[in-house]
Image: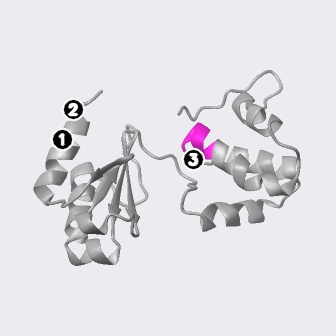
Amino acid sequence: MGNTCQCGNNGKDEKLEKILDKYTQDKSNLIQILNEVQEGYGYIPEKAQMRISEYLNIPMAEIYGVITFYSRFTLKPKGKYHVAVCLGTACFVKGSEKILDRVKQKLGIDVGETTKDGRFSIEATRCIGACGLAPVFTINDEVHGKATVKIVDEVLDKYMKED
């Protein structure tokens, strides 16, 4: 999930051009292209948005609107370990705000930010569909239910020791 430009001699990002080559220049391909860019880079860089705008002949404002409408897409790089704390009703009632506060304190960043070393990022989410395990947080695709501050510390300590 490298997010560096893989530019060839023509100054174009080769990774992005390979994605675009899979699709016709039909505007209906926007979501699929954005999805592949998100998967390839971990976010949707501004340079990619400009190139997609040019390729599909869609205004940048429209592309930005689609990116910000769908929570799957992000404009900022996420950390290697993306921590998401559910603030849906069931989780909130059972104390997910304390969980989020502890994650922010432990990582030294706020919601929507990534640590300077690029290892961790935090997101506050709405219901993830694990209400029976409330409160819940995830790290990448790993769900941690019935969370407590102690569990947050144990799990984050494990990830902090990796690498």
Where residue 2 appears, x then y in whole percent? 54, 31
Q: Which residue is under mark 3?
A: 43
The reply, left or right, for residue 114 in relation to residue 39 is: left
Asked if marks 3 and 2 touch (Cβ < 8 Å), the reply is no
* Residue type highlighted by circle 1: Asp
140 vs 162: above or below: below
Where residue 142 appears, x then y in whole percent? 33, 46
Q: Which residue is under mark 2?
A: 161
Q: Which residue is under mark 1?
A: 157
Q: Residue furthest left?
A: 150
Is 147 magenta? The answer is no
155 vs 75: above or below: above
64 vs 144: above or below: below
Q: Secondary structure at mark 1?
A: helix
Asked if marks 2 and 1 touch (Cβ < 8 Å), the reply is yes
- Quadrant, the C terminus: top left
* Residue type highlighted by circle 3: Tyr
Going 38% across and 42% down the picture, which residue do you hit?
116
Q: Nearer the viewer, residue 114 or 149?
A: 149
- The magenta stretch spans which residues? 37-43
Q: Secondary structure at mark 2?
A: helix
Where residue 102 appears, x then y in whole percent? 20, 59
